Image: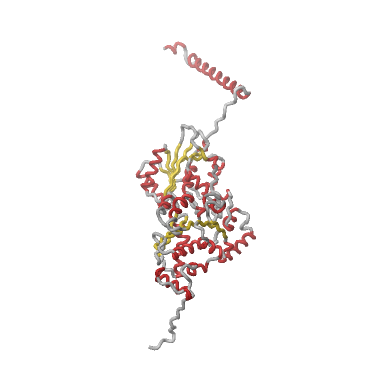
Amino acid sequence: MPRSKKHKPEPRLKFTAREVYEAYVIRHGSKGKAPKEDDGLPRKNSAILGLSRTLFKEQIDFIKDGHKKKAAICSRRSGKSYAAGRYLIQEAMDKEGSMAVYIARTREAAKRILWATLKKANQDYRLGIKFNNADLIATFPNSSQILFTGANDASDVDKLRGAAFSLAVLDEAAFFNIDLKELVNEVLTPALLDLDGSLVMISTPSAACRGFFYKVTEKGGFGFSVHKWTIRDNPYMQHAVKSIDNDIQSGILNANDAAYKREYLGLWARDDQDMVYTASTSNIIDKLPESQEWEYVLSVDLGYNDPTAFIVSCWSEDHPYFFIVDEYKQSKMMVYDVEAKIERFCSDYNIHKVIMDTGGGASRMVLETFKERTSLALTPAKKTQDKVGMIRMMNSDIASGLVKVLGCPMLLDEWGKLQYNRAGTAEDKRHDNHLADAALYAWTDSRHFLHEEKSLPPAFGTDEYWKKYEDELEERLMQEEEMKDSENEYLWGDSYSETELWQ
């Protein structure tokens, strides 16, 4: 049958040599017969089979660096996470049957930052990757795998123990809420020994200017090879660079601000104004002072993927301070776990009140469930639309030394890292604030401000001492005189005769 004039012929598909070879590797894996040296096709160990076309010099230098421990301190939009993704792909394709791991602050952050990017690379370059969206595991045709996970608390870290990785990448390492040094030395370093693997840390600087990543990249410790680049080195973001320069000229951005130096220059620059809480050694105590009237409060910030946090605090009219004396936090706690922990704290302390966050519907449901099942005195946390304002009021008490902390290293760590977002309108979500929020609930409910300062007696022998002595003596003599007058009036007053008194 003759073709219709409107029918267009099928297009002739043309493939580049690179695309032919990629399809060959995907079909046959590393066990297949490689093309001959003189066929002009790239070799398997070349730069990620053409994926490096999208990388620029600083990224390539970082990936090709032969050191087993590497760190990159970069600005925002510098392409550091993109480079990490390409590095992971190269590792998986070059080492058959290996496993690499990408670790972000939380599992959700790992999925958000790089999971979709890996899927796009798979589509663009026909890599043949199979994605397990439930477990966040990407499996390559040569049986290599990339695991995506978080390190939000000890339970997440424990899942990494006992594994054997060829490459471990920690993204946004400056913002981890766990002990990063412990994760590196006690978990990842042993996991990389079997395959002589590499450890990579990348991040923008944090306002805290502290911690393991700070010491590695700023102080040059622990044997890491350190790389630095910024958004200005990224050829794909030059339009953003022009926008930044325009904002500097117009005064929207200040090139001298610590936040600008961190976000756009990748420099460590501390500014206490960026920190949410400013605790110092003056807030730390070794023991509680004496008092007979302690009132203990347990405050709870509910979570599931995020940790549920518990803070025990107390106050007394004998002292002007708000005391924080105990803490606990754990993710994935069920209702009965939370209930058991509350009852344990109530048995350890004379808890007068339990304050619980009811910000979400599920939180309110948990609170009402506890009320029905237990005799605990549960009350919802007092919240306000101006959370930043309440935080600043509490931080004023912290700065003036009115908040005292007994132990509680996890809370102090949260306070030491937690910073505001760039607009200063809320806390930066890259940091944990769960214990900090629980402490804020308790501080809001505290009555430590009811304390009245007792004046000290004047020193013996001073004019004030003798004046006070004379006043007290005069007051006592007047009271005795009034007592005598009252007795005489009662016995012999005009209202009664002597005869009437003895009748």
Q: Residue 210's x, y, as percent? A: 54, 49
Image colouring:
secondary structure
Residue drawn at (63%, 54%) of the image:
256
Q: Nearer the viewer, residue 167 or 445?
A: 167
Q: Is residue 251 left or right of residue 107?
A: right
The quarter of the rendered structure image containing the N terminus is bottom left
Give the residue at the far front of this rendering. 37
**Nearest the camera: 375 or 90?**
90
Can residue 361 be seen here? The reply is: no
Residue 122 visible in the picture: yes
**Image quadrant where residue 341 sits:** top left
Report the number of numbered marks.
0
Q: Residue furthest bottom?
A: 2
| Left-right relation of 384 to 369 | right
85 shown above or below 440: below
Q: Is residue 129 above or below residue 156?
A: below
Camera-side residue: 306 or 491?
Answer: 306
Residue 499: where, in percent of width, then height? Answer: 45, 11
Residue 302 x %, y % = 42, 49
Which residue is at the far left? 373
Query: Going 59% across and 55% down the picture, which residue do you hit?
Result: 261
- Residue 102: where, in percent of width, then height? 45, 58
Tell me the quarter of the image containing the C terminus: top left
